Amino acid sequence: MSNIICDICETKISVINNVLKHKKTEKCQYIKRLLEKKDKLYLDKIKNIENEYNLKISELENEKKENLNKISILTEENITLKCENKAIEKSNESFRKIVEKSATKTTIKNNYTHNNYLNYISSEPIDFKNLKNDLNNIVTTNSLMYDEEYFNEHIVDNILKDKNGKDKVLCTDINRKNFAYKDENSGELVYDPELDKLTEQLRNGIKLKQIRSELLERLIEEYEENGKNGKDPYIKFYEYIQKLNFGNPFVEHVAKKTYIKSKSENTLKHQ
């Protein structure tokens, strides 16, 4: 008769009738308690990580709401200023003519600036329609474990550049973090302050639940294979997963890589 393996401590038992008796032994019960304790610790850590992550998400959402309120206030102020400006124009015809001439010059300047941007931006727009599929191949457990700068560069190279290495995004004002890129449908330049629209598309395009599960599982396996030496896998998990917010460090990185003034200066140097 083949041996029976205890499902708790994996001890070999030769007689089936001795299984229940064996499971009541101190040795088997001790191992059972250890396994239960390990399972509880694992679940507690997972819960703590999720709570911290949800708290951070909530904070970011609150910040976004505050920014939207500020934009709303600025919009109202802008409307008020426009009304005041119209009143001034009605009371002073000569001033109105000066404003019209100034507006004409500004339009010419803006057209020149617009055309200048087209010289440095790729003719190929960002492929938002296939962004989710692209991100599944680009954002993996391997790429998430890159350092922050390398990860950001990985996204820029694979999402924000064409096959010839030309930028699909331009930073038009590095201090205010203003950006421009081509509309996927019309081909016209659209402006995206602080890359709000683009980073939202990046966040929504990632299968967050799947990538989080795969990353945590891998970190725990590596930690146990290394004899539980090194940095706690849950701390590493939290640090790595922050990259998927595509927050200020990512925006700063894109700005430095795509700033229009730097590109213009580099072109002049090589002429």
Image (spheres, grey):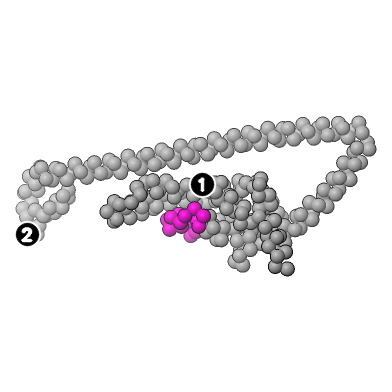
Write down the residue under mark 1.
245
Three-letter amino acid code of the residue under disc 2:
Met
Q: Secondary structure at mark 2?
A: loop
Residue at 76% across, 58% down: 115
Is 75 on the left or on the right of 204, as rendered?
right
Q: Range of the magenta residues?
A: 135-151
Three-letter amino acid code of the residue under disc 1:
Asn
Is 3 on the left or on the right of 196, as rendered?
left
Q: Nearer the viewer, residue 37 or 232?
A: 232
Q: Is residue 164 visible?
A: yes
Residue at 38% across, 46% down: 235
- Measured as percent of width and height from the top left, residue 227 is found at 27, 54
Is 38 on the left or on the right of 120, as rendered?
left
Q: Secondary structure at mark 1?
A: helix
Residue 158 is labelled as none
- Measured as percent of width and height from the top left, residue 234 is found at 37, 46
Could you give the CA–CA distance between mark 2 and mark 1, rounded to whole angstroms? 59 Å
Write down the residue under mark 2.
1
For the N terminus, the quadrant is: bottom left
Residue 59 included in the magenta stretch of the image: no
Closer mark to the observer between disc 2 and disc 1: 1
